[in-house]
Image: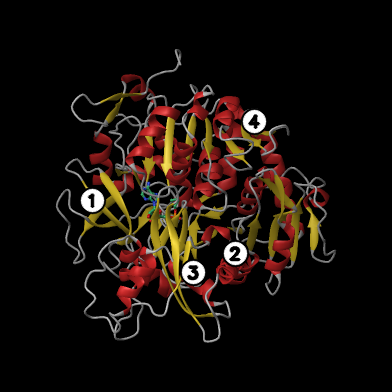
Amino acid sequence: MPNAKRWVEPDPRRENWFWPTEELKARAWAADEKVYEESWADPIRFWEERAKEISWFKRWDKAYHDEPLAYKWFVGGKLNLSYNSLDRHVEAGKGDKVALIWEPEPPNEPNRVFTYKELLAEVSRLANALKELGVKKGDRVGIYLPMIPEAVIAMQAVVRIGAVHSVVFSAFSPESLRDRMVDCGAKVLITADGYYRRGKAITLKQNADKGVEGTKVERVIVVRRAGLDVPMDPSRDVWYHEIVPKQSPECPPEEMDAEDLAFILYTSGTTGKPKGVMHTTGGYAVQVYTTCKWNFNLHEDDIFWCTADVGWITGHSYINYGPLMNGVTTVVYEGAPDTPDYGRMWAVIQKHKVTAYYTAPTAIRMHVKWGEEWPAKYDLSSLRVLGTVGEPINEEAWLWYFKHIGGGRCPIIDTWWQTETGANCVQALPGIGPFIPTVAGRPFPGIRAKILDAGGQPVQPGEGGYLVLEPPFPPSLLRGLWGDPEKFKATYFSEYGPGYYFTRDGARMDEMGNIRITGRVDDVMNVAGHRLATAEVEDALSQHEAVSEVAVVSRPDEVKGEVPVAFVLLKAGYTASEELKKELVKTVDKHIGPTARPAEIYFVDDVPKTRSGKIMRRVLKSLVRGAPPGDITTLRNPECVEQLKSIVGSGG
Ligand code: WT7
């Protein structure tokens, strides 16, 4: 790569530490350490300065309202997310710039490319179609779409008219879709006939049909993607291509209050039922815009590719709103990373000259397995910055990514955040560094974070503790859980009170303030970057008629990070068999989706319990890790531990 610029250099004193080169510093939005101290001393001022970079119909009256459990940002300000993503660039004369490139999975199928002007027109047409179907400000609209341009168009159209989207991952089961649609009370759903995955056309419409049964969904808009023959209910369903093209390409954006709800996104908590995380308009816009710009060092000529699915917060913030608010080009890829071969991702980077690439550690570990010969076939010299997100990244994967994808030239920005935080919160800034494997970095400017012990005292540098965020809370931090204020308080503001947001992650900080995330401290797993509660998998399994009791714990996995492992007690009259295992896996597919499939199902006679009858998952967790079970003297049934040990040890 003779012409490729060098953006980082190694630290001569510390192995595997890297710093930005002068070249990168000159290009970065922040290159001076001072930004940290200054912004942490006065976060409100920092965020107000950033907020001035986006477009407001009316400036805010008060930047931050500090009230326990009712914090607000940019109070009284009026804006629209879609206006900020599209209109403002068109009005600035950038209408002909490419906003979105869609890469379909079949490699011989042409790209679909939208300029900002074209995207604005299409979003406006869909927005008008939604209005025609009766959608009004504040109404919820479900989106159950694969990775096609319409997924971005749909989110944009919904927020354009002040409605609230709730996107559901297209690989989720009809039942998961139904739960979410019922909970948020959506009246319209946008879906598709199907999509391509690993060379096959997968149907989606039939799942959508099952998913809207028994909900308040009155109308369903169906995008034709895969040309599949799907049933249409004429009183409810309408083809996208029949209702959208005839609409006016102009639709004035609704003036939203900064604290008006923008979207609800469901995510796994510690209980069986996913929670609807609520994000409002102003704070979300400002933090997503700023973190996307600073962390990925975005400029006019950047081509940004985030490989997440639009069904996750990463897709919301860094495929859709972040890159578009910054006026760069966003890449949307439909398919699998191994189709037609293991080089697909690198072929796409080469083809579209991607400059910023954002993916998950689990994906990197898969590429490590497939081998470095795959990226070696492609010209990746367009890359300037690499990002990772979703789970702690191990050193081997980090170094592989750095060397074989970044050519040893590009910083790796390991971004820690959550569905709840809406946008990146902890990472190293490209122009400042340092970039260290397994260490995310410092809190973003204007974000205050601490590591506390269980009693609420700050821990010493290097010591493990719990990561919390302090007020003024990040502008894009969730404002609540849909329909469940009690749960909002209990989940995030009970351990340390309303003065700290509890992230539920373990972490350590070094002397310099760099944070290393060690992982969840609750019963939430991270399976190939997908967030999943052990309780959700338990709920799914227990719906099978043969199951009397079940305990699910996570087990570390080389590629996926973690995988669920299930301990199942059968009802009288049922016997353990491979057949039954398969049925149980099907049950999980049906209730949640294939992402939640247990890697192992053990049929057992008993699981460890406390005297009050609570399953001691801690003991099971140790067993599947081959670790000593710890203190079992308080168990009601300590004798079962030996039996479990031998079952787990023999592999079931
Ligand atoms: C959990 C949140 C944020 C978008 C994707 C995941 C883990 C996230 C990192 C990172 C270590 C990370 C945490 C967090 N996590 N990013 N860079 N290093 N862990 O969002 O599904 O809401 O999951 O993902 O455990 O709590 P999510």
Can you see residue 431?
yes
Instruction: Tell me the distance, in whole angstroms, between the alpha carbons under discs 2 and 1.
Output: 36 Å
Q: Secondary structure at mark 1?
A: strand
Where residue 194 appears, as percent x and y from the top left, is 72, 52
Residue 589: mark in rendering: 2
- Cα–Cα gap, marks 1 and 4: 46 Å
Q: Which mark is residue 95?
A: 4
Q: Earlier in the sequence, mark 1 or mark 4?
A: 4
The image position of residue 561, as x and y in percent, is 41, 51
> What's under tag 3, amino acid-wise?
Glu
- Which residue matches tag 3? 536
> How far is disc 4 from disc 2 in space, using C-alphas?
44 Å
**Amino acid identity at mark 1:** Arg
Mark sitting on residue 508: 1
Q: Earlier in the sequence, mark 4 or mark 2?
A: 4
| Mark 4 burial class by Cα count in 10 Å: few <14, some 14-19, many 20+ | many
Comparing 81 with 545, the one in front is 545
Q: The residue under label 4 is which amino acid type?
A: Gly
**Residue plotted at (52% across, 87% down):** 572
Query: Which residue is the extreme one toward the right?
Result: 234
Q: Is 53 left, or right, of 414 in this rendering?
A: right
**Residue 23: image tag:** none
- Badge 4 element: loop
Give the residue drawn at x 54%, y 23%.
Answer: 378
Mark 3 or mark 4, which is nearer the start of the sequence? 4
The answer to whether the residues at label 4 and label 3 have Cβ atoms under 8 Å apart is: no
Q: CA distance from mark 3 to mark 2?
A: 12 Å
